[in-house]
């Protein structure tokens, strides 16, 4: 027995040792196990299938010595809560994915779904293991199918910490949140050599698919970090705001007395003039507990801000127009970003707070040809079918289609509040007067004075702050300094909102 135990210990140590770490170190990268250590609570990791490797006849891949087949997979806890995780090990065959490697990831995804736990994939891989051929591609397909099956049921987080090329890039794209680290992470379908061969274009790895490219231009990366430690710290922070699955409520913190609190600075942050810019994130800081929130897709489509935070201890997802970027207009990218966030919050029972200050959709051929209608429709769709508690606060202007899609009463918000600075209309006064009175003004003896009169009349008739409330399209006009308290009360009122109308014994009466 002692011989068997000693042999087991030797083989186990060999299996889990990993490859030569010098190459990772030289690139400023951690090893797979070091990454898992940073992600998970100390001593909580339980590894699955450390011995599994590709075996063809008697030929083992990657041969004798350290194996794990290039991926360390298993489960542990984050702040005491169960998660599943896998970390690809670039020191073994470049972390490439063959059948055995894929099977370990499949196992972790299956267990995460079966137990209703979040799953985190740490990617660092040369992609499909070339020498295995089609079973490697089959392995990827199995990952994608499982990710789609688990979508909306358990949170999925993908962390890119090295190369992630070819079809492998679809795993991060299918995840709910994707983290990337500057300089070391690259995500692309075809690398620089293939790009050059096919198109003649010369481009470096980072310029093609580095963290900033995906964090700013493509929107594939939700979060971009300078180093692995801060990246994995933020994965833990994100997890602290998410439920384990779609049947559990998001983790609540202790109440913070928000329903009784005034925030005088809110009246100073937002200028009363509708077109003067300010940073909507300053408003978020005033509304949220501890002035703390996690911004999603900070660098991409920054004209809309999406964030997770807490109000009175309860997790809330915030969508807000950002007057500091592109004057806060909505465009195709902003609509995609917000739509995806709204769908995520709805799937995981996270109430939505929508802060509205929007001049409209961005006009022009670039937007129209780029599908702003198609992407705007996604945002409409996401809000229309969201069954979580929904609160809208209109800070200043809300014009046209952009007013509708920003969780207006007509598409189902539960409670709409507005500041006394609200202006809600089909369009702003100047544009409206030019459309309605263009011919009259062209022939007026003093067209400047006539136009000014028409603008003043339009503003007085249609843009006054009680026009929408009088028609029941806004529930109440609130003092800006009382917004945190009002939102906290509204969310408390809606806390027990059910996702579906409960069935009556004899069937529901159609509305
Ligand atoms: C097998 C691989 C491999 C792969 C790397 N290695 N990629 N082995 N299959 N896909 C091995 C290398 O042979 C090398 O082994 C070790 O990993 C380290 O690789 P290097 O090239 O020395 O590292 P580096 O210079 O840092 O370059 C990293 C890299 C490069 C940019 C990722 O390795 C690379 O371009 N690999 C191929 C990428 C690729 O085209 N993959 C297929 C994508 S298509 P030794 O023994 O020398 O240390 C795909 C389809 C998926 O994935 C479809 C899913 C639907």
Image (spheres, rainbow, N blue to C red):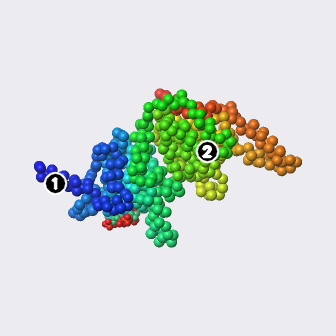
Residue bearing the label numbered 1: 7
Point 69% across, 43% down: residue: 426
Point 37% across, 57% down: residue: 29
Q: Is residue 468 visible?
A: no
Mark 1 beta carbon near ligand 1 (under 8 Å): no
- Specify the farthest residue to the right: 445
Q: Is residue 279 visible?
A: yes
Residue 177: which disc? none
Direction from residue 494 to residue 61 in the image, left or right: left
**Label 1 crowd (10 A; few <14 / some 14-19 / many >=20):** few
**Label 2 crowd (10 A; few <14 / some 14-19 / many >=20):** some
- Which quadrant of the figure contains the C terminus? top right
**Where's residue 146, x and y in %?**
39, 50
* Nearest-to-viewer mark from 2 and 1: 2
Give above or below for 83 relative to 172.
Answer: above
Give above or below for 266 relative to 130.
Answer: above
Mark 2 beta carbon near ligand 1 (under 8 Å): no
Give above or below for 44 relative to 14.
Answer: above
Q: Which mark is first along the chain, 1 or 2?
A: 1
> What is the tally of numbered marks visible in this picture?
2
Point 54% across, 40% down: residue: 284
Q: CA distance from mark 2 to mark 1?
A: 67 Å
| Ligand 1 image-quadrant field | bottom left
Point 33% across, 54% down: residue: 32
Residue bearing the label numbered 2: 278
């Amino acid at each position: 027995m002692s011989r068997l135990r000693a042999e087991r210990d030797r083989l186990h140590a060999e299996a889990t040792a990993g490859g030569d770490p010098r190459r990772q170190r030289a690139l400023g990268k951690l090893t797979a196990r070091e990454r898992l250590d940073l992600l998970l609570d100390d001593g909580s990791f339980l590894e699955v299938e450390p011995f599994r490797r590709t075996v063809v006849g008697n030929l083992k891949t990657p041969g004798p010595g350290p194996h794990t087949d290039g991926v360390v997979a298993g489960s542990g806890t984050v702040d005491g809560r169960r998660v599943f995780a896998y970390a690809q090990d670039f020191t073994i065959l470049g972390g490439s994915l063959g059948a055995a490697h894929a099977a370990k990831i499949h196992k972790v995804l299956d267990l995460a779904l079966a137990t209703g736990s979040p799953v985190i994939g740490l990617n660092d891989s040369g992609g499909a293991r070339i020498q295995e051929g089609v079973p490697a591609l089959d392995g990827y397909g199995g990952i994608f199918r499982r990710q789609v099956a688990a979508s909306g049921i358990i949170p999925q987080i993908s962390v890119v910490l090295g190369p992630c090329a070819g079809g492998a890039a679809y795993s991060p794209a299918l995840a709910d949140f994707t983290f990337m680290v500057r300089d070391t992470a690259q995500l692309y379908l075809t690398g620089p050599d293939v790009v050059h061969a096919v198109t003649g274009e010369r481009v470096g790895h980072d310029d093609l698919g580095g963290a900033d490219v995906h964090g700013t231009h493509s929107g594939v990366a939700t979060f971009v970090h300078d180093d692995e430690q801060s990246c994995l710290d933020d994965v833990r922070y994100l997890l602290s705001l998410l439920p384990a699955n779609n049947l559990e409520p998001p983790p609540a913190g202790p109440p913070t007395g928000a329903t009784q609190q005034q925030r005088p600075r809110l009246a100073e942050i937002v200028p009363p003039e509708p077109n003067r810019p300010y940073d909507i994130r300053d408003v978020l800081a005033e509304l949220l507990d501890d002035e703390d929130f996690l911004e999603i897709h900070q660098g991409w489509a920054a004209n809309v801000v999406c964030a997770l935070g807490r109000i009175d201890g309860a997790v809330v997802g915030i969508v807000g127009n950002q007057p500091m970027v592109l004057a806060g207009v909505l465009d195709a990218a902003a609509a995609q970003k917000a739509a995806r966030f709204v769908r995520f919050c709805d799937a995981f029972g996270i109430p939505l707070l929508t802060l509205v200050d929007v001049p409209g959709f961005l006009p022009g051929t670039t937007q129209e040809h780029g599908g702003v209608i198609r992407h705007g429709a996604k945002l409409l769709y996401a809000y229309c079918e969201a069954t979580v508690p929904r609160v809208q606060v209109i800070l200043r202007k809300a014009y046209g289609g952009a007013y509708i899609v920003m969780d207006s009463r007509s598409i189902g918000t539960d409670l709409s509040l507005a500041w006394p600075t609200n202006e809600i209309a089909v369009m702003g006064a100047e544009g409206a007067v030019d459309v309605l009175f263009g011919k009259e003004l062209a022939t007026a003896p003093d067209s400047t004075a006539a136009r000014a009169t028409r603008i003043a009349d339009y503003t007085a008739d249609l843009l006054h702050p009680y026009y929408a409330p009088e028609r029941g399209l806004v529930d109440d006009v609130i003092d800006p300094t009382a917004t945190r308290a009002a939102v906290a009360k509204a969310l408390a009122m809606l806390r027990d909102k059910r996702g579906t109308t409960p069935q009556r014994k004899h069937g529901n009466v159609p509305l």
